[in-house]
Image (cartoon, rainbow, N blue to C red):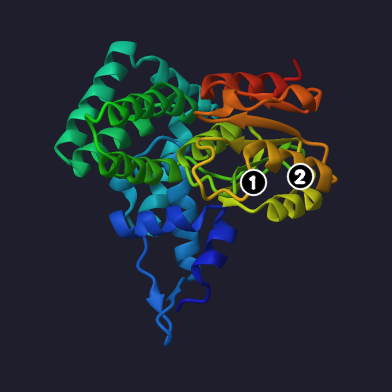
Amino acid sequence: MGILNISGLAKIVGMNVHTIRAWERRYKALQPERSPSGQRTYSIEDVEKLKKLKHLNHMGMSIGRIANLSLNELTLIEQDHSLTNQPDERASVQTRSEAITDDEIHKIILNTIDCLYQYDVDTIHQQLNKYRIQMSAKDFILKVISPLFNMVNRLVLELKLNIAQEHILFAVVRDQISFLITPVTNDHARRVALASPEGDVHEIGIILSHVLCISNDMKSYYLGTNLPLQSLVEVTDSINFKYIILGCSSQNLGYEKLTFNEYIDQYLESAQSDATILITGKTASSIDISGYGGRVQHVESLQALDSILDMRINGN
């Protein structure tokens, strides 16, 4: 009998609601009951099964292969895997990731572009899913997804792809990324907030940055796009963030309440937080940061962001 709603399930298991729904919809991982009002409800057995699916998926097993197994079958696989694998799972995944050559990655990107031309969403899903499992989260983002979107953005500007095709790719990538977003449980980890200012609705950059923060063992709070200034002030005054990552993908399109500099100026005037602000995105370099005394910094690329986070995590 179901006793939890999906939010309660997500909190107990340590997953986000979007990922749970994706696993239900695509792989039939859970079969929730319905309350009289039509709300999904989940049992204790669902909790245990989801925990095991999450664990085995993190160990490199495809969710598509294990989603329909029973709780007992998952337990046996988990036990067998623990006997035949060393504890350092990250090293194992990284080794597999490094075995994928640059030529192979280039072919992945070109094949994905070809599929976009044909609106072949299923093949894009299958291809990206395969390499997401084989690669570390960081390599998947930096070596596949980031250059893929760079190429797609260029082709859209050249009118060789249309906006709908770009949005199709984003939807597929967001589904894939949902598997990579798991909370960092270290209470001493540095905290980072990610958002884009009110008026900027471009999401892909801050989502990819979110995954990189998690990959660098930071507690990452994804606040979303189009975030009102006052909301950012309230959140960062309530939680001790070390860094705030602001996406900057558009400027002066006519619906922003504030320019990017005005947004930062008013934030610094209103907020009590002393967090360092890192500006990322396509138009970040156009923002004048000369008057902020080092408090606000440009980050030219996801690779540069990863280097910054890695250096600061390791105290260099």
Tags 2 and 1 in contact by the CB under 8 Å rule?
A: yes
Distance in Å between CA atoms under marks 2 and 1: 9 Å
Q: In which quarter of the image is the C terminus?
A: top right
Residue 258, labelled with which disc? 1
Pointer 1 local density, CA inside 10 Å: few below 14, some 14–19, many at least 20: some
Instruction: Please tell me which residue is depicted at 46% across the width and 21% down the height of the picture.
Output: 94
Using the image as rendered, state which of residue 112 and residue 13 is in the foreground. Answer: 112
The residue type indicated by label 2 comes to Gln
Using the image as rendered, state which of residue 224 and residue 175 is in the foreground. Answer: 224
- What secondary structure is marked by label 1? loop
The residue type indicated by label 1 comes to Leu
Furthest residue toward front: 254
Q: Where is residue 152 in the image (x, y as percent from the top left)?
A: 31, 29
Image: 183 above or below 216: below
Pointer 2 local density, CA inside 10 Å: few below 14, some 14–19, many at least 20: some
Q: Position of residue 90 (x, y in %)?
A: 52, 27
Furthest residue toward bottom: 36
Residue 266, labelled with which disc? 2
- What secondary structure is marked by label 2? helix
